[in-house]
Image (cartoon, rainbow, N blue to C red):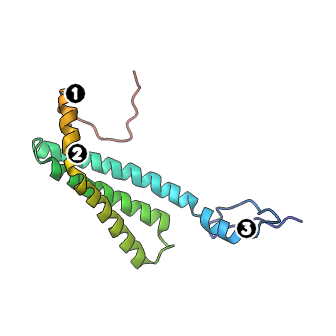
Amino acid sequence: MRRPAQTDEDGIVYLPPAPTFDANPAYVRVFGQVPRVLLGGWLAVFAGDFANNFVLAKMKILTEGRFLWARTIGSTIVGEGLNTLLFYVIALGGILPNSLLVQSILTGWALKVLVEVVFTPVTYRVVRWLKNTEGEDFYDRRTNFNPLIIRRPF
């Protein structure tokens, strides 16, 4: 006789385990989080990248193309802050204690910004090479940043 399906609190894991599978509670606990992790990851990347690109483009206009270090680090502070906040709250909110959740968000955010700071000299070299190679330095003065616009490819 087959056992009934075992689910987590949210009803995510529906299929019953195999009769010989004795680790179903661990399976349910781990894989029951997958939808939250996926949703959190997708929304975090979308919102964080959008915010990063928007801030970077607007700061380039405000600084008249100067202070690349401030633009890259400033946009990373905003974009990765939003990315980290959304991911942790959606994927791990209610699972981690609030104090650990806040500590994890702040630590992840700080590490991402630190990576941007450390790689700033490399960014300068890459940007200089791209500008020289392509012969272009674009400013997003009339760019429509609406992420919901769908255009025909041709």
Q: Residue at x 34, y 58 (%)?
A: 82
Q: Quadrant of the C terminus?
A: top left
Q: Nearer the viewer, residue 18 or 2?
A: 18
**Mark before the other along the chain sequence, 3 or 1:** 3
Amino acid type, residue under disc 1 in the picture: Glu
Residue 126 image position (x, y, % from top left): 23, 40
> Residue tagged by mark 3?
6
Q: Nearer the viewer, residue 134 or 76?
A: 134
> Dot 1: within a 10 Å radius of its alpha carbon, few (fewer than 14), some, or many (20 or more) residues?
few
> Residue tagged by mark 2?
123
Report the mark closest to the observer, 3 or 1: 1
Residue 142 appears anywhere in the view = no
Q: Residue at x 22, y 56 (%)?
A: 117
> Dot 3: within a 10 Å radius of its alpha carbon, few (fewer than 14), some, or many (20 or more) residues?
some
Q: Picture quarter containing residue 87?
A: bottom left
Residue 64 appears anywhere in the view = yes
> Alpha carbon of mark 3 to alpha carbon of mark 2: how far?
50 Å
Which numbered disc covers residue 112? Answer: none
Q: Hey, which residue is sitting farthest right in the picture?
A: 1
> Residue tagged by mark 1?
134
Q: Picture quarter containing residue 142?
A: top left
Amino acid type, residue under disc 3 in the picture: Gln
Left or right: 78 with respect to 102?
left
> Alpha carbon of mark 2 to alpha carbon of mark 1: how far?
16 Å
**Mark before the other along the chain sequence, 2 or 1:** 2
Q: Residue at x 29, y 65 (%)?
A: 110
Q: Mark 3 falls on what kind of element? A: loop
**Mark before the other along the chain sequence, 3 or 2:** 3
Amino acid type, residue under disc 2 in the picture: Thr
Q: Is 68 placed above or below 99 here?
A: above
Q: Is 74 placed above or below 102 here?
A: above
> Alpha carbon of mark 3 to alpha carbon of mark 1: how far?
58 Å
